[in-house]
Amino acid sequence: MTFLAHLHSDLRCTRLTRRGATHHPKDVPRGLHKEYQRMPQFRLPEPESLTTTLSEALKQRRSGVSGNAEIPVTFQEMGTVLGLALRKPSPMHHGRHYPSGGGLYPVETYLISTALESQTPAVFHYNPTTHALEMLWDLPLNFNMKDIARNPEPLSLSSMLVFTGVWNRSSAKYGDLAYQHTLIEAGHMSENVLLVGCALGLSMRPYAGFDDTLIISLLDLDGELEQPVHAVILCKKPQHATGSLPANED
Ligand SMILES: Cc1cc2nc3c(=O)[nH]c(=O)nc-3n(C[C@H](O)[C@H](O)[C@H](O)COP(=O)(O)O)c2cc1C
């Protein structure tokens, strides 16, 4: 079978016709995100100042596989990663710290973690307006983080940030082109997260090889409307860590 390049061309063509769009562009709401208001809210600390420069982070960033999944990631570290990479500059502003096609922000961020400071293993949603983790529910008792990675050896992971596409937030305006815009946006978000994580000395790795069905179940998503598109795994580095190991091909 040849590579599906024709699908790319087909989707790019819809840039002109907006095939599948359901709304007039001016009627599409901008800057929306999900909120789980009835769930416990854990307001994250304000991001700390980074001492690593951008050029150092760009040069030093590597996908890590080694870490100590037993050491919890602190609230301060999570607040710095999410606050610098993904939040809104201010609650009144509909933008974020990353770009989005049409300012529609179709990507949501969830955290699945077995080692977050003072928390039992649980699933969270990140609210970019309040800079809070909304605690959704506990992970199953026998849950192992490696269950969500399709090729888990030799990874160490204690947390996974999951990026999901809420397709109709973008397809209302762009129709089928929403597919590309959503994936590209998840890439921008991932890179922000990786650079901040690198500056903090966390072990991080972009990870598309997750188990889609299990993630959809853990996040309780309606798989027709919202699907996982990308993820970043993270972990504390062991004390003696020296950089990254080769990639784990999926
Ligand atoms: C879109 C994307 C998906 C990836 N998926 C996986 C994955 O499923 N498993 C994995 O071990 N690494 C994954 N990686 C990490 C790459 O293997 C890694 O970035 C690459 O080997 C280059 O190494 P570096 O990030 O250290 O520069 C992914 C990276 C990207 C950008």
Image (cartoon, rainbow, N blue to C red):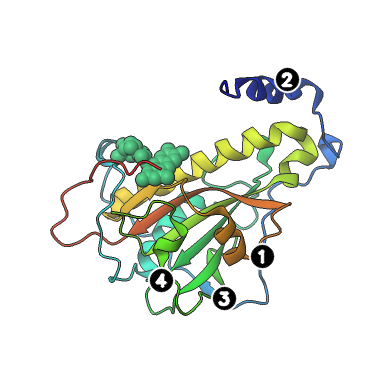
Residue nearest the observer in this picture, 136 or 217 = 217
**Mark 2: is the Cβ under 8 angstroms from ligand 1?**
no
Q: Residues within 10 Å of mark 4 (few under 14, many from 20)?
A: many
Q: Amino acid at mark 1?
A: Glu
| Count of marks, rendered view | 4
Task: Specify which label sits upstream in the sequence, 3 or 4.
Answer: 4
Mark 1 falls on what kind of element? loop
Residue 32 is situated, as x and y percent measured from the top left of the image, at: 70, 52
On screen, residue 236 versus residue 98, left or right, reads: left
Point out which mark residue 35 bears. 1
Task: Specify which label sits upstream in the sequence, 3 or 2.
Answer: 2
Q: Is residue 182 above or below residue 147?
A: above
**Is residue 11 shown to the viewer in this render?**
yes
Going 56% across and 36% down the picture, which residue do you hit? 184
**Is residue 87 shown to the viewer in this render?**
no
The N terminus - image quarter: top right
Question: Mark 3 touching mark 4, by CB under 8 A?
Answer: no
Task: Specify which label sits upstream in the sequence, 1 or 3.
Answer: 1
Q: Mark 1 or mark 3: which is in front?
A: 3
Residue 51 is situated, as x and y percent measured from the top left of the image, at: 26, 50
Q: Where, by quadrant of the figure, is residue 200 drawn?
A: bottom left
Going 62% across and 40% down the picture, which residue do you hit? 182
Residue nearest the observer in this picture, 70 or 171 = 70
Q: Amino acid at mark 3?
A: Trp
